[in-house]
Amino acid sequence: MGYIEKNLMEGEHIVMRAELHYIVYWQPALLILLSILLFVFQISPEVYTYQGIVAAILLVVAFFMVVYIHGNRKYILTNKRLIEKIGIIRRDSRELLLRKCEGVQLSQSIMGRILNYGTVIVSTTGEATNDYKFIKDPIRFSTLINQQIDALRDDS
């Protein structure tokens, strides 16, 4: 049982776990590609050992980047809240009560539309906004947020 499941309120259940789009892994992928190129293509016999060391360092850096990206952000929509958990070792959590939300905006670049990722922006009373970036299938996520907000208003 994870952090989110342990901290659900009474009568609260998870509606959706928004996933980060794979586009966030472009930097580690580039480092892995560069390290493979360093392993495969020998510049000269004298520096091949150093090439291998640099390639290994790049692989280690890429590994830690993937671990950091994958474990760093979690976005959870429940029937009462929108929860953002940030951090692996040190944890920060932002919780947004859906009954305080006023609107949901969606922002997608051309590449985001092609690859189906984007930013969902939720505005609250008091002019505050929360951005949820690089969300996979942002239209579904924003639609579900709106449905939960609407359901809470109907219950009131």
Image: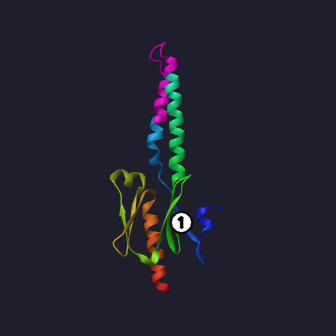
Q: Is residue 112 magenta?
A: no
Give the image location of residue 144, x and y in percent. 47, 70
Vertical relation: 117 (above or below) 67: below
Badge 1 local density, few (<14 within 10 Å), some, or many (20+)?
Answer: some
The residue at the point 52 percent across, 54 percent down is 87
- Which residue corresponds to mark 1? 16
Give the image location of residue 117, x and y in percent. 42, 55
- Under mark 1, the amino acid is Met
| Left or right of 7, for residue 58 | left
Give the image location of residue 141, x and y in percent. 46, 65
Question: Which scheme is used to colour this image of the protein?
Answer: rainbow
Vertical relation: 78 (above or below) 62: below
In the image, farthest residue toward the bottom: 156
The residue at the point 66 percent across, 62 percent down is 1
Vertical relation: 28 (above or below) 46: below
- Give the quarter of the image for residue 15: bottom right
Work out whether residue 102 or residue 96 is closer to the camera in this orientation and state it: 96
Q: Which residues are magenta?
A: 31-50
Most prominent secondary structure in the magenta stretch?
helix
Number of marks:
1
The residue at the point 45 percent across, 48 percent down is 24
Q: Secondary structure at mark 1?
A: strand
Give the image location of residue 61, x and y in percent. 51, 37
